[in-house]
Amino acid sequence: MEELKSCPVGTLYSEVNLQNHIFALELGEYGPADPRQPNTEFWQNKMKIWDVNEGTAIMRVCTSCHFADKTAEMQDCIIEGPGGEFKESDLPLNPVWAEIDGLPYYYCTRWNMTINPLRTCNGWQPEDWEPDEDEDEEHSKNYVEKALTYKPTTGMASAARRALKWKDEGRRGGTRVGLARANQLVRRENLSESTVLRMYSFFSRHAVDKQATGFSSGEEGFPSPGRVAWDLWGGDAGESWSKAKRDQIMRRRESK
Ligand code: SF4
C-alpha cells in the first residue's frame, strides 16, 4: 500500500470513486450509459450545450479531454488501488451501465474518478486547453471534499423515524441535538466527517444504556429514555455504521 500513497483519492477509495461518479452524472451529465449505441438524445443535448455540430460533439470523449490522465503511473494506481475495483457497471443505475471489454480505465482529474474513454461530460476541454490554474484546482478540490461525506443507511432512517414518532407521543429521552440528528437521518442527508465522528462518540458513551430495563421491546418501560435517544441517532444500525465509517476515516488520516 506504501507505493500507492501518491495516487489520487478516487483510486484509493471505491466509495469516493462511486460518489464522484454520482456528482459527474448529476452536475456534468456524464455518460452515455452504453457508448456503443447511437445515443441520439444524449449527443443532441451535448451539441446544444457546446454549441457544435454532431460530428464535433461525438469526438469530444474522455480519451481526447484535457482532464483525462492516461499515464502509465495512473494506470498502476487504477489497477492496484482499491478505488480502481469500482466499475461503472456498479453504479446504482437502471439500466446498468455497459462495460466495454478491452478498454482501459483512465482517470479524470476534474471529477476525481476513473473514466471510460468513450464517455464524456459537459466539462470536456481539448487536450491543449490552458486552464486558469486557481480555478481548476479549486474545482477539483470541491468535488473531493464533497465526496468525503457519508450517506446514512435506510436502517438508520427507520430508527430515527421511529424515535421521532415516540417524541411526538411525548416519550422522554434525547436532546435538541438528537432531534436535529434524527431529522438529518430521516432525510438521509450526506453527513460530514465531523458528524460521523460525533455519532461514533455518542454511541460509545451511551452503549451502557442498552443494559437498562425498557431498552428492548417487550420490557417494562419500553421505550426507555435511553432507547429514544439511541434511536434518534440511528439506533443499532447507526452504531455499526458510525464505527465502520470512523475506522475508514482514521485509516485515511493515518495514510496521509
Ligand atoms: S472532464 Fe473530461 S475526462 Fe473528465 S469526465 Fe468530463 S470529459 Fe471525461
Image (cartoon, helix red, strand yellow):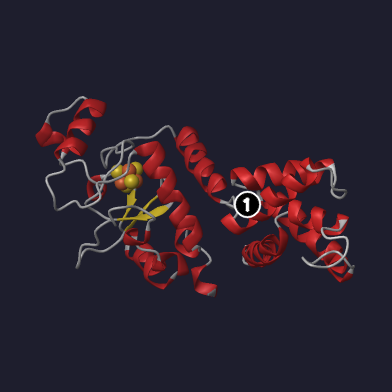
x and y percent of residue 63 in the render?
A: 24, 51
Q: Is residue 213 above or below residue 202?
A: below
Q: Is residue 141 above or below residue 72?
A: above
Residue 1 in the figure: left or right of residue 131: right
User: Which quarter of the rendered picture does the C terminus lie within?
Assistant: bottom right
Residue 240 in the figure: left or right of residue 140: right
Residue visible at 41% across and 73% down in the picture: 80
Amino acid type at circle 1 is: Ala
Residue 152 in the figure: left or right of residue 60: right
x and y percent of residue 163 in the render?
A: 74, 50
Residue 226 in the figure: left or right of residue 56: right
Per the image, the residue denoted by label 1 is 157
- What is the residue that sits farthest to the bottom in this orientation? 1
Residue visible at 86% across and 64% down in the picture: 214
* Rendering quarter of residue 117: bottom left
Residue 196 in view:
yes
**Relative depth, front residue between 227 and 251:** 227
**Relative depth, front residue between 120 and 134:** 120
x and y percent of residue 47 in the render?
A: 19, 30
x and y percent of residue 195 in the render?
A: 71, 50
Residue visible at 40% across and 68% down in the picture: 85
Q: Is residue 137 above or below residue 45?
A: below
Residue visible at 33% across and 58% down in the picture: 88
Q: Secondary structure at mark 1?
A: helix
